Amino acid sequence: MTQPKPQTRIQKKNTTAILDAALEVFSQHGYRGATLDQIARAADLSKPNLLYYFPSKEAIHVALLSGLMDTWLDPLRALDPDGKPVDEIIGYVHRKLQISRAYPRESRLFANEIIQGAPRIHEVLGGELKTLVDEKARVLQGWMDAGQIAPADPHHLIFSIWALTQHYADFDVQVRAILGPDTGRNFDGAQAYLDVLFNKLLAP
Amino acid sequence: MTQPKPQTRIQKKNTTAILDAALEVFSQHGYRGATLDQIARAADLSKPNLLYYFPSKEAIHVALLSGLMDTWLDPLRALDPDGKPVDEIIGYVHRKLQISRAYPRESRLFANEIIQGAPRIHEVLGGELKTLVDEKARVLQGWMDAGQIAPADPHHLIFSIWALTQHYADFDVQVRAILGPDTGRNFDGAQAYLDVLFNKLLAP
DNA sequence: GGCTAGTTTTACCAAATGGTCAGGATCACG
DNA sequence: CGTGATCCTGACCATTTGGTAAAACTAGCC
């Protein structure tokens, strides 16, 4: 897929610095609201030097998003049809919440893109994502039909996991304004709450 | 609070046209990503004419947000400490979901503002919002202590309601990519799912 | 050391952006 | 109809924005 083009030491250093800086800026202002100057400053490079490594602003954004998709879908892919149903689902919730905790900027980048109409990943949503979700929804439906978990719309079950876990990354400012600034503590509270919630919801 | 300044017919017509256009544009691109030209075009006015009614871009944004806060908080305010606990909470979920359905642009405007660090409503979050949430959290806690609903962290309970209902407005593109374009149908599905979820969660 | 590929900077550009201002058009009301 | 207040426009401005060209510098290898 992404075959490793020959990269010099400097190239590797600078492209990662740029992508990290761009993640910071794009996730905070959205695509249109971000400027190359901001990104260049954050990456400690001059603007023309930025454009030596990436041909355009959009190219940086696309590079970020496509590099992100796997991180985003892997936790769902890992849901094992042959595992114990409740454990699998609760495990998925945990993985998703862990990702929100460890990669809040990535979560916000994704949220920004979706809220703004997903102009750059629309095909992925209707293609790869839909395929994966439909597949896993069938797995969930199978478990429900077999009486291993309580019946519920499997698609909405997946949505609810996304909504509940991503909320703590995307709306972090709001959560902190209400619960206090200790993000770690807030996430611990969230995990305990979500454990209870999904155990009750899924109990057959 | 907001005493009705004398408004001519034309003033009323144009300010509402501007605010509606601005809602459209800001909710789609965020504050920084929106331009006065876009807003002016959407409101069918010239840019200088826009600025005849509002002194600056930021003033429009602030007007929108502050006009929105009540719509946003009212459903929670309406949660009645003297009502039947489960009915009150499920009712709150319904009201919130209704608002997501009826005002998705407002929801996205709010989401954009929060994701981008809430620079313009930070004080409201830590002030009015926190006060209200803390108050209602105490009500919930009272119900739990009295055994009328199952125990759970009341703050996270409120967050979960926000996350689950706003998700369907904010991530509408994603939902439609997976479930299909019939938004009404999707919201109906969501409501049924959320009814089940919260009934199970709250059952004492 | 010298050569080449890779890297960075300086100077620049056209378009877009938020905003101003003076004057002209239009409205409401006596 | 006249007149004062309200409304609207075209021309303009400084700054910012994404992006370019070419020259200057540096790394790494023989």
Image: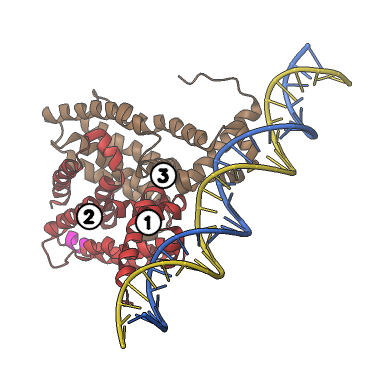
Chain colours: A red, B brown, C blue, D yellow
Q: Name the subunit of mark 2.
A: A
The main secondary structure of the magenta stretch is helix
For the residues labelled 2 and 3, say whether their Cβ atoms are less than 8 Å apart.
no
Q: CA distance from mark 3 to mark 1?
A: 14 Å
Q: Residue at x 27, y 67 (%)?
A: A135
Q: Which residue is mark 2?
A: A99
Image quarter for residue A122?
bottom left
How many neighbours does mark 1 have within 10 angstroms: few (below 14), some (14-19), or many (20 or more)?
many
- Could one spot residue B18 in this view of the protein? yes
Query: Which amino acid type is shown beneath numbered disc 2?
Result: Ile
Left or right, A192 with reference to A44:
left
Q: Name the subunit of mark 1.
A: B
Whether the magenta-drawn stretch holds residue A177 is answered as no
- Residue A126, relative to residue B101: is it above or below? below
Query: Which amino acid type is shown beneath numbered disc 3?
Result: Arg
Q: Which mark is residue B174?
A: 1
How many neighbours does mark 2 have within 10 angstroms: few (below 14), some (14-19), or many (20 or more)?
some
